[in-house]
Image (cartoon, coloured by chain):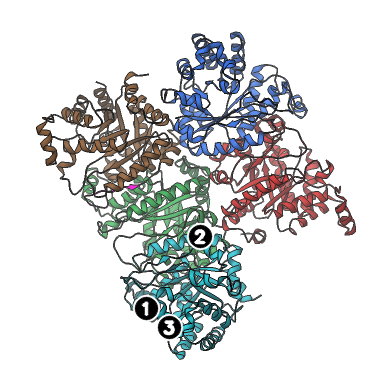
Chain colours: A brown, B blue, C red, D green, E cyan
C-alpha cells in the first residue's frame, strides 16, 4: 500500500510471486516500512571475526536472542545471520521479523589475501527456518572468485524457484587489489554491478572512497567528469551502476565508530540516493538503548 | 506481539519456524490481526459450481483481481483459491495478503454421491506463488476417502518440511451418510477430529446442526448430556473435538443468505469459541461495498 | 540390565542395532521396565470411532497432552496414536516416553464389512517425531487385505532399515468371517501368525473366545486336543502361534467395562503367558486417578 | 523430569522432536542423568593415533566391547567412536547407552600441519546402528577447513531432518596458527563459536590456556578486561562464546596425566560453568577399576 | 557346524544375515572349512604389475580359468580378482568357490610414491557375478588416502546392506613413510586398525618386520615392552590391534620366494594367531601341481 514500494517491485517483475512477496515483506516491515528504504541488522561477526572481538564490548550480544530482539525493537526491516544464530531464535521469533540466512561465511583463523568462504547453509534450510532471503558474500578480486560466483549462481537459481530473495554482500578483495582499492569508487561501483549481473535482488557494498584503483577506469572517470568528490556523489554513482537504480543497493556501516561519524556517513548515503544501511557492529556493540536511539536516527535520515 | 497469538502458536510447537512464521502471518494480518480470530475469503466456487452459478450475481467476480482486492480491502486474514485464480493475481498482489493455494478441486459436471477431487496444484507451486498455506478438501464418508487421506498425508509431510501451513476443508459426504448427516453435530465433530489427526493446522467445517447421524454416537451424546441445542453449543463441541481447542477450527458461511441470518450464525460461532469464518458466496456474490460492510460486521462479531 | 529383556532381544537377532535399541527402550521404560512385560496406551479412537464416543466420558481426553501425561504418569511402556495426536505433544514430551506412530487409520463414517484403512503417516515422519516404532493395523479376512499386507510389507522394510520397531494390530474382519469369528481362537491365533510372518516385532490381537470359526481348523483343534476352554489356555495358544512365544504378542482391552472384568481378563492373559496389554478406552475413559490406579493394578498382574 | 534438562532443551526449540528426544536421552542417561552435565567416553584414538599408542598401556582396550562396558559401568552419558568400534558392539549393547558415531577421522601416518579428515560413516549408518548422535571434527585454521565446514553443514542438515543430535569437535590447527595458539583462549572461544554457528548441538573444545594468539583479539581482551587468568575464567568465556551458554560446550581431557592434574582441570571446568567432559585416554588407558573411580570423581566434581 | 566358526561369526553380530551367510560360506569352504582359518588365492597382479611380470613364469596363468581351477583344486576358501578375471569364469564356476571382487586397482604405468587406485567395479557387479565379498585396497600414508577411505566407506555401507562381506587390503605407502616403514610393526598394526575402524570384515596386511617407523609409537613399544622380535610376536600384535582378535586378519605372501621361506613365514603367522594367508604369486607362478602341494602344506600349517 505504498507507491514507492510498488515502484521498486516493478523492477523485479520477472521474479516469481514468492520472491516478490518476501521482498515486499522486507520493504514493508519495521519503522521504514513502506518508504522503500532499509535498515538491516547483520550479525555474522561472531563467525567472521570471533566472539570476543564481536560481542565483548556489549556482552548481551553473546546471546542469539539479543539480536532478534534488537532488530525487532529497533524496527529494522530484517535481521541477517549465519545458521547457528538464526536457528537459535527461529522457533521463538518465527514471523516477527524477516530474516536473511547467510549461506557462506569465513573465519579469521586462516590468513590470506584471497578469501574463499565456506558454504554454511542451504536454501532448504532457509525455508525450514522461515527466512525471507538468503545472503551470500562474494569477494570480487579474489583468486577464488569463480568458486563463489558459481555457488551464488546456483543458489540464486534455487532461491528464485522457491520464492526467496537473494542478498549479496559484494566485497572486493584479493592480491591484485590494493588495500585502498577495496573501497575505491571504481571498484565499489564495479562490485555492485557484478552482484546485479549475477541476479542479486539486494546488493550490499561498503561506502566508497574517492580513490580510483584501475587506470583503465580512471581515464573514463576523468574524461566523463563523473563526480566522485563527496560521498553523496559516490553513492549516486554506485546506485546508477546498480542498473540505473533499479536494484536495491545498501551500504555497510563498517567498524564501530563515533555517532557523528555514523550520522555523517548515513547522510551522505541518503543524499546520494542509497536505499539504506546494513549496520552490524555500530548497532550491537553499543548498549541496547543507545543502539536503538542510533538506529532510529539512522532510519530518520534515510526517511529524509 | 500478541499474547493470544503466542498462545495459539504454542500449540504448534512441533512445527518448523517456516510453518510457524506463515501461521503467524495469517494470525497477524488484516482487521483481526493479533486477536487470534480469522476471516478468510475462499473463492473456489468457479471450479466447484461453475462460473455463472458463482459470479453472475455480482459479475466483477469473474475477474480474479476482484477477489484479491476484496480480501485486501475487507481486511481478511487470507485469501484461498485454486491455482488459476491465485496465479492470475499473484504477481500483482505479492505479499499484500497471505494466500492459500487449494491443491484439490472437483467440478460439478460429474454427478455422484461420493466425491473424489483431483489434485490441481503442488506444494512447490505454493512456494513459487508465495502462498502461506496449502488448502485441501477431504470428504469423510466418501468411498474415495482413502485416496484423499493419502494425498493430504503426503502433501502435509512435504508442506511442513518446506515451511507452509496446512488448511483442511473437512466435508462429510458419501452414500453412507444422509443429506442431513453431512452437517450433523456428531459427523461435523468427527470430521474436525479426522482433519486434526491427519496433521492439519487449520480445519474448516460447516456450522453443524443439532441432528445426530450415527446411532453409536447418539448413545454417547445422550449418556454424557453433551449440549447441542444452540449453534454456540455445537461450535463449542466441535472446537473441543479439535484437540480440546488446540487446533484452529473455522466455519464456512455456506450458501448465500440474508444478512441477519449470516450475523446470527457468526454470533453462534463466536459464542461457541470458534476461531473464525471462511465466507465465500456470502461475500463475493454481494456488491463489493456491501460485502465489505458485511465482512467488517462479521469481524466485529468474532472480535467480541 | 535384565536377563529377561536380553532373552527377548535374542529372538530379534536379525534386526539392526537401531531397531534393537528402540525395542530395548520400550522394554525398559515405565513401571514394567525390565520385566519383559508391556502395558501400552493406544489412543486412536478419536480417528476410528469419533471424538465424542472416545472422549466425552472423560473429557480431558479431548486434549492431546492428556494422553502423553497419562501414559507417563501411569508408567506405561509406550504411547501409540495417529500423526495429529503424536505431533501435538511431540515437542513438549520429546524423549519422555517411547511413542508409536500409527501409520494407518480408518474412520467409522463409511460403513462396510471389509475395512481398508488409509495411510496417514510415514516412516520419515516417525523419525522426525522421535518415535520408537511404527504401528499399523491389518484386517485379515477383508477383501482389501492385500492392500494392507503390501503396505505394511513396504513400511516394515523401510522401518527396519531406519532403526524403528514395527507394531502390528491384527484384527480379523470381513464378509467371509462371522462376527463371532473375528475373535475365535482359531482366527485369533491365525491373525497373530500372519502378523509375525509379515515381520512384525510386536503383535496386538484381541483376547480370543473359545469359538472356532473354520471347519478345517476345528478338526485339528479337536484331533490334537488343543486346550482352549479358559482364556489362559487360549492366550497360551496364541503365544505359541506367535513363533512359539518368540514374538511379543499383546492383547487389547476392548470396550470400556467394569474393573473386575478388566482384571479377570488381564489375569487370564498373564496366566497364559501373554506379554502384556494395550489398553485404550478402559484407561482414558476413566478419570485420570482411577485410570492410573487401574493401570498399576494391570501392571502388577502382568508382573506376576 | 528435570527442570535443568527442560531449560537446556528450551535452547534447542527449533529442533524436531526426534533430535530433542535423542538430546534428552543423552541428558538423562548415566550417573549425571538429569543434572544437565555430561561425561562422555570417546574412543577414536585407535584411528587417530594408532592401536599401540592408544591401547598398549591398558590392553583390554584393544577390544571394542571393553569401551562399551566401561562407558556403561562408569555411568557415562554417551560413548563416541568411529564406525568399526561402534558396529562391533552395537548389536550386543543396543539401547544400553547413547552412542555417537564419529563420521570423520584422520590417521597419523601422513604428516602435515593442516589436517583434513576423511568421511568414515554416514547419517544413515548412525540410524542403522541406533546412535543418538553423529560426531564430526573440524579443524579451524586448516587450509582444508572449507571442506570440513561444508561436509558438516550437509551432514547437520540431514541429521536434523532424521532426528539425530550433532556433536562437533572443534580443534584449531593449521599452518597459520602457532602450536600455543591451538589452545589459546581467543582461538578456543572462536572455535566454539564457529561450531555453534554451523548448527552444532554439542561442542567439544580443549581446555584453553591464557595465551592469546591473534593481535586483533588481544586488543579486545585487554580493552574489555576479559578475565582469563584462571581456567574457570577461561571456561566461563568459552561458555559465553557458545551463544551465551545456550549451546552445550564440553571439554576434552587431553593426553593421559596424573589424577591430581585431571581433577584440578575438571574443577576449573566445573567452576567456569562448563557442561562437562569428554575423557578418552585418561579413562581407557587406566585399569578399569581405576578408570571408573576417576570417572566417578570427575562426575562428582561436575555435579558440584 | 563348527564351534570356532560360530565364535567368529559372533564378532559380526551387527551384520545382516546376508553378510553373515557369505562370511559363513568363506569360513566353511575348502580344505580349511570349519577351522576358522583361511587361505585365499588373489590374482590382481595382471592389473597391478602387468601380464608378463605376473604370468610368464607359469604361462597357463594368462588364462582366467586357470586361477578358478587352481583355487578350487587346492581347496582355497576363496578366490579374489578384478572384474575381468572374475567375470571370465563366473558363469562356468558359479557357486563352486566363494569369490571376492576387487573393486579398485592401480596399474604400474604411472609412477609415484602416493598411490590412488581407480574404482574398477561396483557392489551391484559383485551381486551379478555371485561374489561373496568385495575387496578393496587402501594405502594409508598416501596423500590420496581420503579418496580411498571415502570410497571404501561408501562401498562398505552398500555392501553391508546388500549382504556382502568386505575385505580390505591395507597397505601403508606414501611419501611420509620410509620404504622400511611400509612394513614396520607399528605401521602394520596401525594399518590393520584403520581397516577395522572403517568397518572391514576381513583385513589383509603384509607380514610386518621388527622395524618401528614412528617415534611416537617407538616410545610406547619400549615403555610397554611389546614383544616384536619374532614374526609370531608381531603377528600376535597385529591380531590384537584388529579389535583384540575380533576381526579376521590375514597375511599376504609377498613376492615369489623359496618354499622354505614361505613355510617359515606361514609358521610364524600361524604361531602368532593369524587367521590365514592370501597367497598370489607364490601360488600361480609355480607349476600347478607344485602350487597345490605348497598350498596344502600352507593349509596344514594354519590348521596347526
Mark 1 touches mark 3? (CB < 8 Å):
no
Residue C191 is left or right of residue E274, and the answer is right
**C131 in relation to A259, above or below:** below
Mark 3 or mark 2: which comes first in sequence? 3
Q: Is residue E99 magenta?
A: no
Q: Nearer the viewer, residue D207 or A193?
A: A193
Parent chain of label 2: E
Provide residue E259's location: percent of width, then percent of height.
Answer: 47, 90
Mark 1 or mark 3: which comes first in sequence? 3
- Find disc 2 in the rendering and name its residue: E157
Q: Is residue A112 magenta?
A: yes
- Pointer 1: residues within 10 angstroms few (<14), some, or many (20+)? few
Parent chain of label 1: E
Alpha-carbon span between mark 1 and mark 3: 46 Å
- Find disc 3 in the rendering and name its residue: E56
Provide residue B72's location: percent of width, then percent of height.
Answer: 45, 18
State which region is magenta. A107-119
Determine if residue D106 is in view: no
Majority secondary structure of the magenta segment?
A: loop
Amino acid at each position: 500500500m505504498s507507491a514507492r514500494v510498488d515502484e521498486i517491485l516493478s523492477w523485479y517483475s520477472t521474479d516469481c510471486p514468492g520472491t516478490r512477496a518476501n521482498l515486499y515483506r522486507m520493504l514493508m516491515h519495521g519503522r521504514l516500512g513502506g518508504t522503500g528504504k532499509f535498515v538491516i541488522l547483520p550479525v555474522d561477526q561472531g563467525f567472521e571475526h570471533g566472539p570476543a572481538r564481536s560481542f565483548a564490548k556489549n556482552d548481551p550480544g553473546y546471546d542469539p536472542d539479543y539480536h532478534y530482539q534488537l532488530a525487532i525493537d529497533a524496527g529494522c526491516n530484517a535481521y541477517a545471520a549465519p545458521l547457528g544464530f538464526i536457528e537459535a531464535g527461529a522457533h521463538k521469533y518465527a514471523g516477527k521479523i524477516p530474516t536473511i540466512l547467510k549461506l557462506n561465511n569465513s573465519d579469521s583463523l586462516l590468513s590470506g589475501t584471497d578469501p574463499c568462504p565456506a558454504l554454511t547453509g542451504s536454501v532448504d534450510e532457509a525455508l525450514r527456518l522461515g527466512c525471507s532471503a538468503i545472503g551470500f558474500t562474494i569477494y570480487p578480486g579474489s583468486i577464488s572468485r569463480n568458486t563463489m560466483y558459481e555457488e551464488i549462481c546456483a543458489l540464486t537459481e534455487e532461491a528464485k524457484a522457491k520464492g526467496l530473495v537473494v542478498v549479496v554482500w559484494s566485497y572486493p578483495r584479493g592480491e591484485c587489489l590494493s588495500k585502498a582499492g577495496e573501497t575505491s569508487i571504481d571498484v565499489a561501483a564495479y562490485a555492485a554491478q557484478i552482484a546485479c549481473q549475477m541476479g542479486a535482488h539486494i546488493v550490499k557494498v561498503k561506502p566508497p572512497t574517492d580513490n580510483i584503483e584501475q587506470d583503465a577506469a580512471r581515464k573514463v572517470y576523468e574524461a566523463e567528469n563523473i563526480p566522485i568528490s563527496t560521498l553523496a556523489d559516490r553513492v549516486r554513482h554506485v546506485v546508477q551502476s546498480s542498473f540505473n537504480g533499479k536494484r536495491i543497493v545498501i551500504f555497510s556501516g563498517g567498524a564501530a565508530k563515533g555517532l557523528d561519524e555514523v550520522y555523517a556517513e548515513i547522510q551522505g548515503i541518503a543524499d546520494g540516493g542509497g536505499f539504506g544501511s546494513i549496520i552490524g557492529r555500530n548497532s550491537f556493540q553499543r548498549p541496547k538503548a543507545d543502539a536503538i536511539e542510533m538506529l532510529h536516527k539512522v532510519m530518520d535520515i534515510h526517511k529524509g
